Every structure is written in structure tokens, then in C-alpha cells.
Image: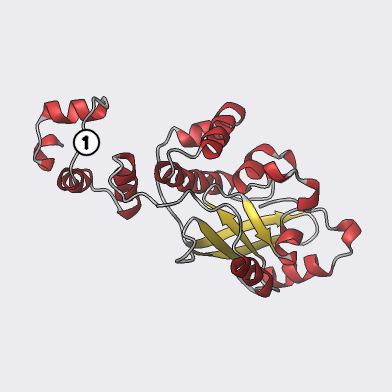
Amino acid sequence: MAELAGVSTDYIVRLEQGRGLLPSEEVLEALSHALRLDDDERAYLFDLARRRLPSPDKPVTAPAPELARLVEDLSPLPAMLVDHRYDILVRNREMALLVTDFELVPPSRRDTMWLCLMDPAMRDFYVERERVISEGIADLRAAWAAHPDDQRLADMLAELRAGSEEFARAWAGHDVKVRGRGSKPLCLPIAGPLTVTFEVLVPLQDPDQRVIIYRAADPDSRAALDRLVAAPATVRASPGV
């Protein structure tokens, strides 16, 4: 790798050991090519080397009023606004029906990754649970590299590593990937099996926040979502994220 990147083996060793080196952008680009990194992995490398221009402000964790209204206006599509930690800042009625009664969840626990990993009621919600967890952790790793001074994020990651073997195992994989769209097969007690596609929108003025929109992937899933919305409130208990 040193030869491909055009640097000495000793330089690579010192860089791996974190011995005070601050590699130039040219060296980072060369390492990216030598390691055949994709765009997300390259961004992660630059974040680790602190070569990405720092944000002038701390991450914004309060929802912008315009984004909060957008989430509401997206009804009947399930939608929510999250920050870089995946704390749920705003959700509309349809997302609450699909996920859980957030009023019963302490505000500090209204985080999609924490709920998925630590709430037993959500264990069977994702049909492809292992994949969803792996993808979520790969995204969180990118957020951690971009916000190394975020103590709340660091504390949450430490808690998840200590409390969830699934998280610890996936975190050790060192995957980095930001996924803007995809699909998730779900299993809900009331609505039955269904598949949703998701789209992640990142506002230009609030890049640390994301609007996540779910849509039914097929007619059967659309019918299942309709059943969920129409079900009496007393029988809707169907937690998941």
C-alpha cells in the first residue's frame, strides 16, 4: 500500500499508530486510491484526518420550524426528522402509528438505533434485522467521524457497545456507508408483513438533520399501511423503527 500511495512504509506505520502526523490532502487522496475507497469511505478518512472544513457551529439539534411543518405536510406518507445521531426530533401521525407511541418513550431514548437495539418490543419489527443494524451503524460511524467532539453521541455509542452484542459486533466491522434510499421489509402485529421504501432528504441549510420518508413498496404493503391507520387506537400497539 505504501508503494501505491507513494509514501514510505515507515510513514504508514507512524500514521497507523497515530504518532502526531497530519497527512496532506495529497497523501489522503493517494491513500484513498491505494485502498480503493468508495465516496463514503473516502469522506470518513478525511474526517478522521480532520481535513474536512469544520462547521462554524455545533450541530443543530433543535428542529427547524420549516422542517417540522414539512414532516407534518408529508402525511399520509410516514415521515420523521432526525439529527446526525438519529435522535427523532419530529414525526408525523403516520410514522408514530408505524413505529410506536413516542409519548411512552423517554425523550432521551427517542433514537432509532437505541430503540432498535435496546427495546425488546422492537426485536421482531425488522425482517432483515441484521442488515438494518449493520447499515445503521455504518451511517453512525460516519457521523461519529464528522462530529468527534459530540459527547452525547460518544456516550450513546459507548452505551450501545456495552449493552448490545449486536451493536458491538457490527461496530467492530468498521463499515462506513451513508444510505440515502433503500427498502425495509417489516412485520407488524396489526398490519401484518409489509415492505417500505425509504428516502432520506438532507436540507442544505441544516445538513446535520434529515427528513426520512417511508412509502409502501407494493400494493399489498399499501393495503397493510391502510389497515394500520384504520385500526382502533386500542389495538395499534406495533412498536418498531
Quadrant housing residue 149: top left
Q: Nearer the viewer, residue 35 or 189?
A: 35
188 displayed left or right of 166: right
State whether residue 95 is above or below residue 118: below
**Which amino acid type is marked by label 1?**
Leu
Residue 6 appears in the figure: yes
Q: Which residue is mark 1?
A: 22
Quadrant housing residue 76: bottom right
Instruction: Tell me which residue sits at (76%, 52%) in the image.
Output: 102
Instruction: Tell me which residue sits at (53%, 39%) in the image.
Output: 153
Quadrant housing residue 159: top right
- In the structure shown, which secondary structural element does the residue marked by tag 1 occupy? loop
Instruction: Tell me which residue sits at (50%, 50%) in the image.
Output: 59
Q: Nearer the viewer, residue 110 or 174?
A: 110
Residue 118 screen position, x and y as percent: 67, 37
Residue 32 screen position, x and y as percent: 22, 47
